[in-house]
Image: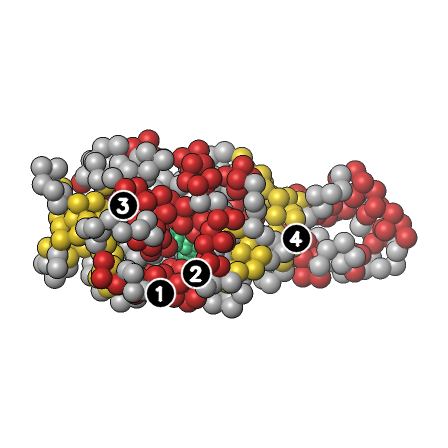
Amino acid sequence: MSNFSIAIIGGGAAGMMSAASALEQGSNGDLSVCLFEKNAILGQKVLISGGGRCNVTTGIEDIKDVLKKYPRGSRFLSYSMYEFSPRKVYEWFESHGVPLKVESDKRVFPVSDNGQDVVNAFEQIFSSDDNAHRMNLALGRSIVDVIHDENNEYAFELISQNGEHFFSKKLILTTGGQAYRQTGSTGDGYAFAQKLGHTITQLGPSLNNFFVQESWAKNCAGVSLEKVVLTLTGSEKWKFVGDFVFTHKGVSGPAIFALSSYSAFDVVSIKSPLKLNIDFFPNEKEEILSKRFDDALAEHPKKMIINLVDMFLPRSLAIASFEATGIDGGKYTSRVSREERNKLVGFMKNASLTLIARGAGEEFVTAGGISTDEIDQKTMESKICRGLFFAGEIVNFDGFTGGFNLQASWATGKLAGISAFGK
Ligand SMILES: Cc1cc2nc3c(=O)[nH]c(=O)nc-3n(C[C@H](O)[C@H](O)[C@H](O)COP(=O)(O)OP(=O)(O)OC[C@H]3O[C@@H](n4cnc5c(N)ncnc54)[C@H](O)[C@@H]3O)c2cc1C
């Protein structure tokens, strides 16, 4: 069969949820759904998300707080987020046989810590007795072209890589962004949407780590710090408080991901670096820290200065502070000049790093996408092409780490499936 009432291109989180929610609307005589996925399996990105554990959603319940986690698209997402809130997503998965747990940082995972259970829940819905006859899974089918003819009942024609033609009354585009391209999300949907009259906003990598120039930072690889204050200076100045880790090549962690998200459209290179400033003592004013450091100096005149700084910072960071400031760590504290001590306190309150590249191809999501001005946020239907719907990362919204991107895919996917069924 090659005629369907609803065709969905992209079997990731948004596509699977769109299909499931259309099926869950009950039976309207002619419902037939076909989910096209270029991979041989569903939910490739869901399977690798959260390090394979799949951070399904967030445990934050207040929707206003949830919406603050989206640097782009929060207003657009507001309706779908109330309709299918993190709490409802939680209950939906539990009712489909995936028990969940909320971790202390509010991230929600399957109790099994296995993302496969999330994909299995959809596979069970699709193959159930109620649905098997009206649900078609076209796996290993890459759609290479979409043609629209509004005069035809089957207004959408989809052409696969093998030259097969499929027809549908409604089309839901859920091809995702273009991050982690090896998962199949190569941005194909942008071209389809453009062809159907839509605008694609500027695209950029988001949720990435950065490479740094300074060798002292690389020597701190593995040091992780909680609730530091980071300030990033690029085309704007952004501040974020959160957890942070030094890596072999630079910096990473939730606070860095958030800053990468704010700066998604800034070019980062050796010629055009971003500046990162780190306050390792955000709860202590500089004068107070300075006084505490002076007191320690006076109390330990015979200590080597490195061993004194060691009382303030983790060992490898203490060593790094001498590389960064050019001060001899072997000096006795009594011989440390005022200028040197100012430099050391300056490092603790305002260490400076030069970000010279984003972790190439390692970003988690794509910022930008189909312009939200062109989509009805209450139905996910195109305002330009009737019968066309969008859901998931292909749309111009993106969130921080913590389950917010999957949550947005579930919420918009649910709405798209219901709307495509109902009209
Ligand atoms: C490593 C990693 C870890 C992540 N961890 C988390 C996490 O723990 N929590 C969280 O909230 N978010 C996480 N994210 C982000 C989240 O996974 C995505 O935002 C989300 O999966 C997007 O869902 P989607 O359905 O819109 O797109 P995708 O999941 O990208 O799905 C799109 C699908 O469309 C298919 N496709 C594309 N073009 C075609 C075509 N022409 N024909 C047929 N099929 C096509 C692709 O093969 C793909 O399967 C992570 C991302 C990455 C890369």
Instruction: Classify mark 3: helix, strand or loop.
Output: helix
Residue 96 is tagged as 2
First in sequence: mark 4 vs mark 1: 1
First in sequence: mark 2 vs mark 4: 2
First in sequence: mark 1 vs mark 2: 2
Residue 209 shown left or right of residue 24 in the figure? right
The reply to whether dot 2 and dot 4 touch (C-beta < 8 Å) is no
Residue corresponding to mark 4 = 226
The reply to whether dot 1 and dot 2 touch (C-beta < 8 Å) is yes
* Amino acid type, callout 3: Phe
Q: CA distance from mark 2 to mark 3?
A: 21 Å
Q: CA distance from mark 3 to mark 4?
A: 47 Å
First in sequence: mark 3 vs mark 4: 4
* Amino acid type, callout 2: His
Residue at 20% x, 36% y is 385
User: Residue 185, can we see it?
Assistant: no
* Amino acid type, callout 4: Glu
Residue corresponding to mark 1 = 124
Disc 2 crowd, CA 10 A, few/some/many (<14, 14-19, 20+): some
